Amino acid sequence: MKPIKIAENIYWVGAIDWDIRDFHGYSTNRGTTYNAYLIMDEKITLIDTVKSSHKADLIARISEIVDPKKIDYIVVNHVEMDHSGALPDMIELIQPEKIICSTMGQKALVQHFHREDWPYEIATPGKDISLGAKTLSFLETRMLHWPDSMFTYVKEDKILFSSDAFGMHLGTSERFDDQVDPAILLDELTKYYANILTLYSPLVKKLIAKIQEIGLEIKMIAPDHGVVWRSNPMMAIEAYDRWSRNEGKGNALIIYDTMWHSTEKMAKEVANGLQDEGISVKLFNLRYNHRSDVMKEVLDASAIILGCSTLNNGLLPRMAGFLMYMRGLRPTNKIGAAFGSYGWSGEAVKLLNEAMTEMKFDLVDEQGIKVKYVPETTDLANCVELGRKVGQALKEKK
Ligand code: FEO
């Protein structure tokens, strides 16, 4: 198993997970990678490890370069198990002089592995650690993605080891951005941000400002998932900058679930109203679309229109699950509207509107549209009108 050289004396020694299709509820249709990096210097340093299931790949790749027992330092940029699962066994094997992590990282490592006796060294921003020819500096990046997260920067090579940030779930034999179709990179980068980082957008905004303020020169970004950005790191930074501002692209999404096609008919008429206003719209039936693929679209959308039939005085389960997921990710700056069919009580539309109000969406119609059983011509015309209203609100907002 070959390591991949990413710079002089720096190697990718991680693992490719071709099989994973679910990452805590996020569909990973193209698999992923757990990236770890080895710096060969007077103090040989391993940056991050891999999921426990892939430990053998990590050891095999390191062993192509050096006996793992010769590693001096292990840097833990992030404690989540996809990067630290193999850590206890690697520590046992390596017996490192230092385990370099943030203050919160030390706490989280103890809470995960219950080893107070490991040789922790706290990485302090502004306090560099020399490896010999290369120097490590650190940036605290709390909540990107966990409280313990930090970035490690190799000053001489201008490489930013960014942990989850700027990463993507993409399993490929290619290791660099210039070896993969840019459309796939953007698609997976978007999906990753939408499903992992949307709720931390204010922190992403601050981080980008900080990088600019300290004038951090970035030649390469080496995240813990997906490709290493060696040719176009600005593509990732500019995308994060854009998403952190929650601007939206002026388009609308209609996200719905339907019991006997009535809500579906309504969805299509709402779409017609939006198109009448010249608004770009996409429809997502939750029966056929995974919540994490829909969230990828929510990230850039300016209007979210939710439709659901009433079931047992509530929502259909797929919509209930989607709402729970979307609320957790806290998308902001959206126009909202709701519609749905019902048989006798009809709570679904009210519940959708309450959820969107809680998310601070601007509702164009506080009641929404409820239709008993099957929509007739006037009901469908009202749905077209709802679409037009959303379209007009979008145009006014521009
Ligand atoms: Fe890739 Fe937050 O773990």
Image (spheres, rainbow, N blue to C red):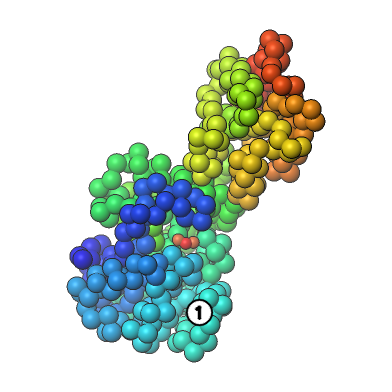
Front residue of 343 and 247? 343
Tell me which corner region of the image, top left, top right, bottom left or bottom right, holds residue 183: top left
Q: Judge left or right: residue 151 versus residue 308.
A: left
Q: Position of residue 322 (x, y in %)?
A: 60, 43
Mark 1 is surrounded, within 10 Å at the Cα level, by few (under 14), some (14 to 19) or many (20 or more) other residues, namely few
Residue that protrudes farthest toward the right in the picture: 345
Front residue of 135 and 342? 342
- Residue drawn 47% across the image and 84% down it: 120
Q: Judge left or right: residue 232 versus residue 2.
A: right
Q: Judge left or right: residue 286 versus residue 62.
A: right
| Vertical side of 159 occupied by 262: above or below | above
Question: How many labels sit on residues?
Answer: 1
Question: In what quadrant of the picture does the C terminus appear?
Answer: top right
The residue that mark 1 highlights is 113
Amino acid under label 1? Phe
- Residue drawn 50% across the image and 35% down it: 288
- Residue drawn 42% across the image and 79% down it: 88
Tell me which corner region of the image, top left, top right, bottom left or bottom right, holds residue 143: bottom right
| Vertical side of 246 occupied by 214: above or below | below
- Residue 25 in view: yes
Q: Position of residue 391 (x, y in %)?
A: 62, 22
